[in-house]
Image: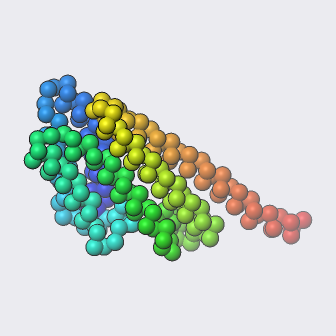
Amino acid sequence: MPGWLAAGFAFAAGFLLPCLFWLCRWQGWPFWWCGLLLLPLALPRRAGNGALAAGLPRAAKWLPGALAALIGGAALLLRDGLPLQYYPVAVNVLFFCVFAASLAQEQSLVERLARRVEPELPPSGARYARRVTQAWCVFFALNGALALASIGAGEAVWAFYNGFVAYVLMGCMFAGEWLIRRRVRRRVHDESAAPGESAHA
């Protein structure tokens, strides 16, 4: 399985599980059947281009799939949907660790991803990418804590938060960063153009 496809499937699984919870409740099906959704993530895959694959050491590329298979397998073996409720928590913890670990490296994860589009990223862009990486660390820490708290609040609350609220918050995070990035780019462009304009005058 290509890495980008596995990353997309892992992301989709986090959204589908809470949605399938409501379907199972409506149809009277046992929720633990949805553990089958996570098992394909353990299939062998090539090195991927996703954010998670880009941040993991080569020896740990198997970790996301193994973790998903462990949770899905536990739900199937125990015939209990509770392990599945920990999947969003596990995803947030994993992303937090990947983003946080990259801060100790020369290039943050967001910078490495940005350089795929803009190889000649200026120093100001690298500094901004590091701040964005830090912001995502805070987001994943808070979102993971809320996902964990939602487990104790009941199945309906868990499904609503992890299947709707968490993705709205993530969308707001993406949109807010995009707006801030536009302002930063405009400011850097104006500052770089100012000396030339002064010399011309």
- Percent x, y of residue 85: 26, 42
Q: Nearer the viewer, residue 81 or 170?
A: 81
Q: Where 101 falls versus 35 (above or below)?
A: below
Q: Nearer the viewer, residue 197 or 131?
A: 131
- Percent x, y of residue 19: 27, 34
| Left or right: 96 as drawn, with respect to 59 | right
The quadrant in which the N terminus is found is: bottom left
Q: Which residue is situated farthest in the right direction here?
A: 201
- Percent x, y of residue 194: 80, 63
Q: How is the image coloured?
A: rainbow
Quarter of the figure with residue 66: bottom left
Residue occupying image coordinates x 28% and y 37%: 18
Residue occupying image coordinates x 28% and y 69%: 60
Residue occupying image coordinates x 28% and y 73%: 59
Residue 96 in sight in this render: yes
Residue occupying image coordinates x 45% and y 68%: 102
Q: Nearer the viewer, residue 35 or 12?
A: 35
Q: Which residue is situated farthest in the front direction here?
A: 152
Q: How many marks?
A: 0
Residue 113 in sight in this render: no
| Left or right: 101 as drawn, with respect to 36 | right
- Percent x, y of residue 175: 53, 45
| Left or right: 62 as drawn, with respect to 146 | left
Q: Where 68 falls versus 127 (above or below)?
A: above
Quarter of the figure with residue 96: bottom left
Q: Nearer the viewer, residue 7 or 164?
A: 164
Q: Where 126 falls versus 21 (above or below)?
A: below
The quadrant in which the C terminus is found is: bottom right
